[in-house]
Amino acid sequence: MKSVRRLKSLQTRLLVPLLVLLTAVWLGTVLLTWLDVRHELDELLDGHLAQAAALLVMQQSGETDHDGVEDAPSLHKYAPKVIFQVFHEGRLVLRSANAGTSPISSHGPGFSTERLGDGQLWRVFSTLGGEDDVLVLVGEHSESRDAILLAVLQGVLVPLAFALPLLALVGWWSVRQGLLPLRQLSQLLGQRRPQALEPLQIDNLPTEMKPMVQSLNALFDRIAQMVDSERRFTADAAHELRTPIAGIRAQAQVAMGAMDDVAQREHALQATLAGCDRATRLVEQLLTLARLEAAAAPTAATFDLSATARRVAADLGSTALERHQTLELVANAPCAVAGDEMLIGVMVRNLIDNAIRYSPDGARILLSITNESGQTVLRVQDSGAGMSEPEMARLGERFFRVLGSQQPGSGLGWSIVRRIADVFGVHVQVSRSKTLGGLSVAVRWPVDARP
Amino acid sequence: MRILLAEDDAMLGDGLRAGLRQLGFQVDWVRDGGAAEREIASGDYAAAVLDLGLPVKDGIDVLQSLRQRKIDTPVLVLTARDAVPDRIRGLDLGADDYVIKPVDLHELGARLRSLVRRSHGQLQDVLRCGAVSLDPSARQVTRHGEVVPLSTREFDLLYVLMLSAGRVMSREQLEQKLYSWGYEVDSNAIEVHIHHLRRKLQPELIQTVRGIGYTVARPQDSA
């Protein structure tokens, strides 16, 4: 969830890692400096301690006859930060003013860190001198080392403490500047009218944005084409609806004007009804097509194509009989295919309907479902006149009708067939029927029909 | 009044033909652009109703080629193409009227009569010659204000003659302008109708130009 939120702003995505890295580098520098300085400081000051101890040892070796404790004078205000004791044969002989009587370190020769009576930490160097009868202890206040360390670190820390916010500010500003074209683009897009689909200028854009804007332009182009095709469709649909309505109107007026010519009135009224049926069919097909255009991804299930074909063929059987046509179905076994049963039914209905409509009276129409090398193939063949090559190529264009055809088709049936085929990824092929001589339409389900 | 109807839609064509016939027009119906151009070019029609989306040859092309050939038969474009650019193009290419489907039959009849009248240089719907007036929309002829009943053919014949007042029309021309397809025309039919018209109206209304044909005098000549 957190990462998703962070993805939302490019600025955050660029700035946060940058600042985190900067801080890490800064902290690393401080740490390394601190370690380095402390090491050098320890070496130097330990050296001094050892040197001081060496001096005391030499001095004590020369003055072995000495009674009582001598307090060394305190010569400088920093003297209390240093402590020393000299023991001769276990007896304290010399000490600094701030040193007690008991040895400040019980450890053997070498360096050690001790907490003394004042409760503070002291760095102590002890060494044996003379013939091992002299013990010299030299101590130094640990705090003074930390003070030096801090003073050194301050020199590093202070500029960095100023630099970091400055860097963050500059980083923020340059990222913002870098994203400026993006903001300008979004402003430009925000102000666009929905109808404005001309491509965006890409010449002055940063290289990184060009692919995105190119894709946007391609999208605009596709939308423009879609809008254009919708516009054409509306115009065509209006055209196709006006003609039957004009026919209905004319026939109705003829019926009204027929006076006592009963035969003419009868004829005109029949034609009016036929015109209404035709307009209804056209409207239904337009609605089917509109629904299909809107259907982004129809639910895909499997169903028995044979059963669907049988049902549709039974529905249309009476129409074929009226025209003395033979409608035959060859589908032996149940045949499961992928797709929406209702829509595939609409497709099969349109194919059979076309065959009945455009074949002469007494024609033969053969509907078959076969399996060809793993593919399910539904085929509708007729013994009609068939089609020329250019006509076959134009099938599926909206409102295309074969010239000279007396049938009151809408020219939409094929658009519907093609559209349904596209939705379910099935392949529609038109050819001349080898067995019947007319048109043959093959609907082929791919082997792995997964829409 | 003979009208050519060019419409590829069976139901609409049938309805328009029947409706225009009821209104007294003689209607011949063709279903494609090629036939439409051929028939209009024959000059037998007083006007044509032309659909634009015709097979073989589009109505616009028919119109364009007719006008290029200087054939001035009035053409009423009847179409579902309602876009303004389509209308402008149709009118600019020589359509005399541009009507969007669906259309009222009576309006269509009136528009056709108006086209015919104008193409004959007549300003008013009612044609007059002496005491005789002919009202094409009411299909009525009066003499001194009294209605004279005429048969359809007699009316049509008088209408053609009065529209072309001052011009001599031969018997063949009259036949072609009067009879739509499918009518058997008797060789003396025109003479019989002329005879009846003279008897019912005025003997001197229609004059015979011997060897050429018949004519009706222009109104200003006789008035």
Image (cartoon, coloured by chain):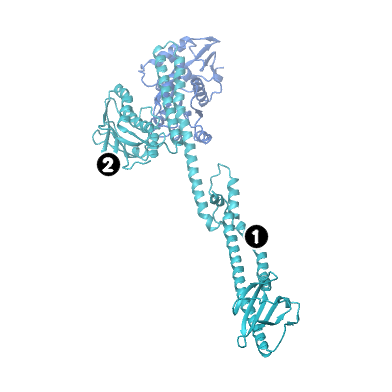
Residue picked out by circle 1: A169
- In this view, the residue farthest toward the left is A435
| Crowd band around label 2 with a 10 angstrom C-alpha radius: few (<14), some (14–19), many (20+) | few
Question: In the rendered image, is residue B70 in sight?
Answer: no
Left or right: residue B157 compared with residue A25: left
Residue B104 % position (x, y): 50, 21
Number of numbered discs: 2
Left or right: residue A212 compared with residue A395: right
Q: Earlier in the sequence, mark 1 or mark 2?
A: 1
**Marker disc for residue A260:** none
Q: Quadrant of the C terminus of chain A?
A: top left
Residue B60 % position (x, y): 45, 34
Question: In the rendered image, is residue A27 in sight?
Answer: yes
Please name the residue shown 54% across and 47% down the image: A198
Q: Amino acid at mark 2?
A: Gly
Q: Quadrant of residue B18?
A: top left
For the colour cyan, the matching chain is A
Q: Nearer the viewer, residue A210 or A132?
A: A132
Residue picked out by circle 2: A374
- In this view, the residue farthest toward the bottom is A62
Q: Amino acid at mark 1?
A: Leu
For the colour blue, the matching chain is B
Q: Secondary structure at mark 1?
A: helix
Q: Secondary structure at mark 2?
A: loop
